[in-house]
Structure formats: structure tokens, C-alpha cells
Image: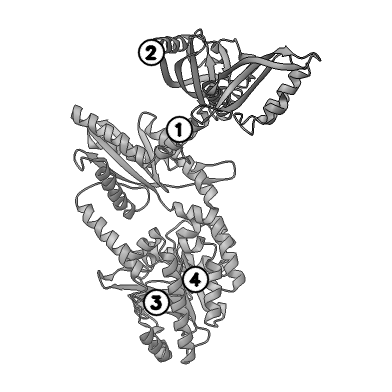
Amino acid sequence: MHTVLAKDPRIHPDDLPHVRRQLVAYLRGELSVFECEHRIRGEDGDWQWVRTRGRAVMHNANGRVRRMAGTARNIDTLRELESQRQIAAEVLRNMRESVAVLDDEFHFIAANPAFSQMSGYDVDEVIGQDTAILNSDRHPPEFYQAARDAIRRQASWSGEMWQRHKDGRDFLCAMQCNAIEDPGTRQRLYMLVTSDITERRRIEQELRYLANFDPLTGLPNRTQLAERLSQAIVQARRSGGMLAVLFLDLDNFKDINDSHGHATGDRVLRAAAQRLRDVVGAQRTVARISGDEFAVVLDNLTAAEEADRCARRILDAFEAPLQLDERHEFVISPSIGISLFPDHAQVPTDLIKHADTAMYRAKRRGKRNYARYSPDMDRDSRRRTSRIAALRRAIEREELSLVYQPELHLTQGRIHSVEALLRWNSTDHGTVPPGEFIPLAEETGLIIPLGEWVLDQACRTLVAWRAAGADPALKMAVNISAVQLLRSDLPDTVARILQRHALPPGVLELELIESVLMSHAEQALRRLHVFRELGVSIAVDDFGTGYSSLSYLHRLPIDTLKIDKTFIDGVAAPDDHDDATITSTIIAMARTLGLATVAEGVETPAQLAFLQRHGCDIAQGFHISRPLPGDDCQHFLETAPARAGHWLDPAPTPA
């Protein structure tokens, strides 16, 4: 029989081996019933799946089966459903989302591996358990009951819900629950699809925080400031009140970054932010705008003077050093600009801009100052912005030049040195005084490239003079700002320029104002020792205007003190004995410390005679020479020996 069956063309060739095996097993008595699923060709010629069942109904004398009877049932639909079920089960097993099937009382009846991974429970542990085993204390019981009621009522529910992991930690889920029907029992079931969104929410919250708050200080940033300021303006409009914006900039903060590093600078910013919060109070908005710039919003004001008083309180609070730890403290002061709503502007951007403009006016008045905005400041601000832009282009436009002022040695009768002074003749702004553009260069950092250009040009000029026969001992003095001093590569820059022009280090003198050395004492000391090792001499400019102590001066590797012009002005005046006393004391003190002295601003023979009489070493000023262009100064140097007697003629003794 199986031989005949094996040749039956109605059975699909691929299924014949399986059918034959099942039949042989039945004929051998291994199966009680012949049963097999296979494909047969239908009347329409297409293959269709059938389930065949049969038994033997006739045997021969030897007991062999001669005839079988049975049924063949079409199972195409069942096979399709089973295929779909297997595919669905495989999809469910491999889904990243947790999927669970619940009965109508919210007990688990099935779950996929992702559910176990998310909840920590094996599937076998939860089958038959109520979903409440996952409830978190972050929601009250009423919350979970309301969700169940909504699912029963609407046959669907979606939302976010805190769940509790098997290990006890809570995690946030995005849930979608839909009612389904068991096709066999027609019972209502629920399919629960869940995703753990804890990390996603954390990242979203972090991004939201970073979008609105400064991560260094924890203060609101510019975006959040604008939002809070908008709300304050709306409230002020409703109440008819007044509010103020205070814009603060920490004076010389860049010096701290340059000398101590950004890590220390960040600590200073955090300490400054905390002090601001302490002064202003938690009910006010204190924001960090950028870098070392902060803003304060003062709402519910009744008078502009309240903003002034707050600014003064802030300035007073910063009189005390910022104590970072037992070893580090910094004295830093803000400059503050104030703008008012509704007097000065109606929208946040303009209020902030006007307060910023007023801050620059305060900064020009000196440290620890504040200023209230006025419309004329806009003109100054535009001019300042325009000058900064022009200053950036000044070198390439060849608008900068140097002039040189000779310094006379009072005992040797020769020109001992010349001081290089920077001048700017702008195409756009005409001749700009150094007192205006040098501070701009320091604020913007342009002093770094400008300072390097000055050093290079001064050394280039000195080389030309030496080649033309100038005294080989002639020194070139160049002014150095605090920003330049505190840059770690300044010694390398100086060494490179000296090497480029083949000049010995001893012919270069760097001048630093006294206040720079005092406000950055330890950093300045370390840097000056590097210059001493290099062989470059150091002069302290404007001496007497600061508060240097003898012990500190003695520690500094300096060579020269330059006495400020304000003291020289009165040394020969009959009614001003203070300046004469101060000047003679400085000269005597310098001699004790082994330092040379240079008197600045010498304009009369009487002043020169006083200086000679008290042992001052060098004089500089209009009585000797005005600052001269390079070629004119070279001519002056060539003819100076013939004029030495005229300069050094005795003058009447001052009364």
C-alpha cells in the first residue's frame, strides 16, 4: 500500500516522504491511528493543506492491510492562523517593549522577556499575580484605581506611571493598555505595553535644566533670566510698579583665570555667585549671563533709589575677600550698571542691554562703582564698539606707531634709555589717546597681540639705532600690562623677539605699574624671577601711587623705581613740601634697596635740580624731550651729548 501511495500524484512531492513514514509506522503497529498533515492538489489544481486520519478496514489472510478508510480535512485556514500565531509569538518574544497580557481582574496571564528584564520578575513569578505587585509609593492607591477604572470604562488607557522593580527601586514607565478578546473563550483581556522611560526623562530634565540654568553656579542663565524678566514686566505693568535690572561684571577676573587657571577661576565664580545670592536674597532673581557677568532682577520697587541702594550693598559685600579655602582667598569687585522699567526700556532684551551699557560707564569710573543708565550712554557704547572693531584692524591697517621718550642719566650726563610709547592714528576715529584705547585693548584681550607688536617694533628700532652708531648700552623700555604679565608665554615671547633681532637681554627693560604687582603679588613674583633669569631688567612704573611695602619690594627681582609725575609736579613749588618730602624719601629708600630711580614728568630746570641734589639717578620728561618718532629720536640721540651741559646746569634751590 505504501508503494502505491508513494506514487500518488495528488500528494505534494515534498510531503510524500513524511506521509510514507507515518503510514509505515501505522502499518507496523507503532501508531494506533494514521494521522498526517500534508498538501494535496485540489480540484482547481492548487495545493491545499489537509489533515488526514484513517484506519485499516480490511486485512488479507496473512493479516496485512488491504484497505483503509478515513477523512481528509482542509486545514489551510488553521495553518494560516497557526503561522500568524507563531510569528506573533516570535515578535512578542523579541520586542524591546515590555508586553503583558492581563485577565479582566488585572492578573498576569502572559508576559514577554522584555517584561522580565524591565521589572526584575521572571514570567513564572507573576503569572496569576495582581499587577499591584509593581505599584510604587510615588503614586497614591487612588491613582492606580483610577487607571483601572478608566481602562474598564474606555477599553483603553495611556500615560506615565511609576512602577517598582523587584529590587525595590522605582522606575518611570510610559504605558499603553488596550482591551482585547480571547478568540476561544470570548473573555475580555488586557494587553499592557510598557517602556521604561526613567533615563529618557532624566536626560530630558537635564537638558531642560541646562537650557535654563548655568551648570557651574546653579544660577538661571540668560534664557531663564529673559523669561523671569518678562514675567516681572507683565506683573509691573498690571500693578503700575517699577523694576530694575542690575548688570554686574567682575573687575579683572580674567587675570585670575590667566594666573591661577580656569579651575580656580570657576571656584571664584561659584563663590561670587553665592555672595550675590546672600546679598540680594532668595526671593530675587540672580542670573549668570556669561563668563564673569551676572544680572539681578529687582521687582516691586517704589523708587529708583532702591536699586542704587542694592548696588551699594553688593559693592560693600565684595569688600571682603572671597575665601575659597584656608589657603586661597581673592579680593574681587564688581562694576554694576542699572536700568529701570518702565523708564529706560519696555522689553527684557533692551533692559539687559541698557544695564550692560551702564556697567561699562561704571567700569570707566574705576573699580567698585555703579552707574544708572541714561540715553547718552548709547552714544558712548556705539563709539566704544566701533573703536574696538577699529582697534582689531589697526595693526593690519598700519595705523599704530611708536614714539620714544629719552631718559637722561643725571650723574653720567648721557641718555640712559628711551621709553617706547604706543600711538594710534585711526582712519575712522582720528588720533585716539592711549588712555582710551589701552583700557579697551586690555578688556578685550587685544593687548596681547598689540603688546607683542610693540615689543617687536621697539627692538627693531633699537637694532637700527645701534647700527647707526647709538650707544650700545642704551636701553629700550617697554610697558607691560597685567594681562600680558600673567600670560604664561610672555617670557617665551620676549626671548623669541630678542633672539629674532639678535639683541642682548640686558638692553630691554619691562615696565609694570605698581598696582599690578600688588594685586597679583605671588604670580608677579614668580614671573619676574623668570625675567631675571632671562637677563631682562624690570622697572616699577607710577611708584608711590600704590601701597607697596618695603618688605614686598625687597622680595621683588626689580631694578628700577619710576617716581610718578604727581609727586614730581610739586617738588620745586615753594608751598608744597609734601611732594618734596615723599620724592626724597622714595629716592633714599630705593638707594637703600639697591634700586635705581627714574623721575617721570620732569618739566622745569628747578625740578631737575631738586632731583640732582637728592641723588635721583635718571630723569624723564618734557624738559629733556617730548616723545619723538623713531627717526627724530635717533637724531636726538646723536646730538644729545652736546646738550648735556645745558640740562645739568644748576637751578635755584626751591624754597
User: Which residue bears the numbered disc 4?
Assistant: 510
**Mark 3 or mark 4: which is in front?**
4
User: Which residue bears the numbered disc 3?
Assistant: 608
For the residues labelled 3 and 4, the Cα–Cα distance comes to 24 Å
- First-in-chain label (1 vs 3): 1
**CA neighbours of label 3 inside 10 A, class few (<14), some (14 to 19), many (20+):** many
Can residue 559 be seen in the rendering of this structure? Answer: no
Viewer-closest of 575 and 648:
648
- First-in-chain label (4 vs 2): 2
As drawn, 200 above or below 164: below
Looking at the picture, how far across and down is residue 6, in whole percent? 69, 30
**Mark 1 or mark 4: which is in front?**
1
User: Which residue bears the numbered disc 1?
Assistant: 205
Q: In the rendered view, does 133 fall on the left or right side of 301?
A: right
Image quadrant occupied by the N terminus: top right
As drawn, 333 above or below 126: below
- First-in-chain label (1 vs 4): 1
For the residues labelled 2 and 3, the Cα–Cα distance comes to 103 Å
- First-in-chain label (2 vs 1): 2
- First-in-chain label (3 vs 4): 4
For residue 154, the mark is 2
Q: Amino acid at mark 2?
A: Gln
For the residues labelled 4 and 2, the Cα–Cα distance comes to 85 Å
For the residues labelled 1 and 4, the Cα–Cα distance comes to 53 Å
